[in-house]
Structures are given as structure tokens and as C-alpha cells.
Amino acid sequence: MSELQAALVALAVEAARVGDLDTLERALGAGVPVDAMSGRRDSLLMLASYHGHVSLVRALLARGADPDTRDARGQTALSGAAFKGLVDVAEVLVEYGASVNARSDEGRTPLMMAAAFDRADMVRWLVAHGADPDIRDAAGLRAVDAAAVLGANGTGRVLREM
């Protein structure tokens, strides 16, 4: 990668992180691939999703970003949104085909992330959109178990009542 290309990717990465749609659009227009990654292997989509920038998430997906691209830990943008409880971001990701049951390298799903970090609204939304609460991760834990391990009583209760 040339110095100019690397600088453009760095610009796009920072724009995705801070929510600067204009700069992101200009970087993409200048040739930055829509699925470009940061040095830490976070995609533009992962960064925009994790930081709650719905308009950037939609713009990247509309330009062809893969909704199930994985970061260095095998997590998808939906897992990041679930961890943060960003239902509005999740809605856009799923609208563009993100898998609600995508599994990380450790076998964790977005539902497990939402449950473990006590994101009750996200847990309800994911289950309503097809997330399977009975999937087990590599350690054999389900979402309700992940909630119990981290003391996420609210999501544990929600999952037990479903």
C-alpha cells in the first residue's frame, strides 16, 4: 500500500470512529475500499457501529460493506452494537443482512454480548429478530449463563421469562 493510500485509509478509519460522514464519503470516493480495516483489524463498519453512528453504518452498507465482516477476535459489527446496546444500529445492520446468530472465535453471539452486559432492550430486540437463546459458546454457556456469570440480573431475568 502506498503512503497516500495508507493516509486515506487512516483518514477513513478516524472518520468512521468520530462519525464524520463527509470525510468518510470523500475517502471512499478517493478509492478507500468500503471494507478497509484499521491497524487493529477493525473494519470501517465495525468502528461506525460500535460508536453508534447510524448514518455512517447505513452509508457503508449501502456502498456494499459486508455486514458480517469480522474483527481480529472474530466479532461482527452486530456484536459491537449488542455490547453497547445500540438497537438503532442493530436495526440497520440486520436490515442489510447481518446474521443475528453470528459467532465469534469463542462462539459468542450478539445475544450473549447483550446479555452479559445487561442490555435488556437489545436482548429483547435480538430475540424478536431471530437470535437463538439456546446457542452455546465454546465454554458451553448460553446467553442466560453469560448474564449470570457477569451478574447481569436484568437480562438474565428477561431471558428466563422468554
Image (cartoon, helix red, strand yellow):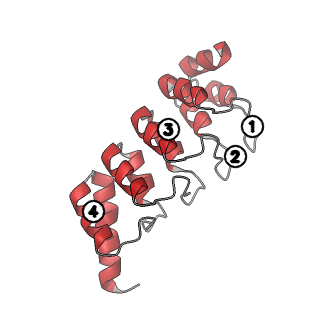
Q: CA distance from mark 4 to mark 3?
A: 27 Å
Q: CA distance from mark 4 to mark 2?
A: 34 Å
Which residue corresponds to the image point at 63% horizontal and 20% vertical from the top-left? 159
Mark 4 surroundings: few (<14), some (14-19) or many (≥20) residues within 10 A: some
* Position of 27 relative to 105 (above/below): below
Secondary structure at numbered mark 2: loop
User: Looking at this rendering, what residue extends furthest in the right direction?
Assistant: 140
Q: Which residue carries the number 3 mark?
A: 83
Q: Badges 2 and 3: C-beta atoms under 8 Å apart?
A: no
Q: Amino acid at mark 4?
A: Glu
Give whichever of discs 1 and 2 has the lower sequence position. Answer: 2
Q: Badges 4 and 3: C-beta atoms under 8 Å apart?
A: no
Secondary structure at numbered mark 4: helix
Q: Quadrant of the N terminus?
A: bottom left
Mark 3 surroundings: few (<14), some (14-19) or many (≥20) residues within 10 A: many
* Position of 65 relative to 134 (above/below): below
Mark 4 or 3: the one toward you: 4
Mark 1 surroundings: few (<14), some (14-19) or many (≥20) residues within 10 A: some
Q: CA distance from mark 1 to mark 2?
A: 7 Å
Q: Amino acid at mark 1?
A: Arg
User: In x, y percent, where is residue 102?
Assistant: 63, 46
Q: Which residue carries the number 4 mark?
A: 25
Q: Which mark is residue 107?
A: 2
Which residue corresponds to the image point at 47% horizontal and 38% vertical from the top-left? 90
